[in-house]
Amino acid sequence: MVSIRHQTRPDSRESEGDDGGLVESLWRKQQRDSIKKGSWRAVSQPLSRPTTSEVGNLLKTPYRQPIDVDAKRAELDAQDDAELAAKRTRIATNAQSAACWEDLISFLELHKLPGAYALAFSAHGIEDLSSLLLLDDSALVSLLERCNIDAMDEILLLEALRSSKAFQ
């Protein structure tokens, strides 16, 4: 069921006739009175006591200290600077690592060996060409056994390492 009640509306400020401002001042007085009545109703309502659960929620609410905006901004700037420095270091390390890998792969391919052996060598601790060239004979034999290099490729690698050691 729909209840249709006619609500009283305040009179409009505009009137059809000119009465020297009497209607307008009456309208303003009505508006002030209605505002006062509305605010009086809000103030005159009795305050209820909080329930036990409301008090418990108030007690559980953590105290929040005021935030120092400048200190927070400085902390965020320092954190951004640290992240940027870490990113630059990581990029430089990756670039150096990539260059070392490229040297090792180029050396292998120059001597007719697959560059994929560089991946097998890196799994066993050889990540750059200089560490491969500086291996002693027993460490080199151990590396070749662990990497399961084909016999012909092993011969080519040993010959390439001997020829490069002759230039040192």
Image (spheres, rainbow, N blue to C red):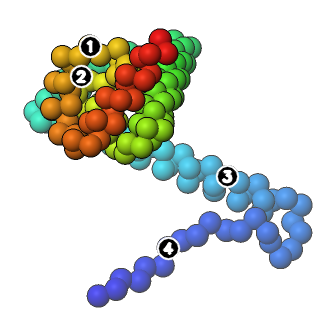
Question: Which residue is the site of mark 1?
Answer: 136
What is the distance, in whole Å, between disc 2 and disc 3 at their CAs?
104 Å
The x, y position of residue 93, in whole percent, is: 46, 23
Q: Work out whether 93 lies above or below 36.
A: above
Q: Which mark is residue 29?
A: 3
Disc 4 marks which amino acid?
A: Gln
Crowding at dot 4, Cα within 10 Å, few <14 / some 14-19 / many 20+, comes out as: few
Which of label 3 and label 1 is nearer to you? Answer: 1
Q: On residue 140, which mark appears?
A: 2
- CA separation in Å, label 3 and label 1: 105 Å
The amino acid type found where label 1 is placed reads Asp
- Residue 132: x %, y % from top left: 34, 22
Residue placed under numbered mark 4 in the picture: 7
> In percent of the image, x 28 and y 35: which residue is there?
155
Q: Nearer the viewer, residue 18 or 167?
A: 167
Residue shown at 63% from the left, 56% from the top: 30
Earlier residue among tags 3 and 1: 3
Measured in 3D between alpha carbons, the distance from the residue under mark 4 to the one under mark 1, in whole angstroms, is 102 Å
> Does 26 sit above or below residue 14?
above
- Mark pair 4, 3: CA separation: 19 Å
Mark sitting earlier along the chain (4/1): 4
- Outermost bottom residue: 1
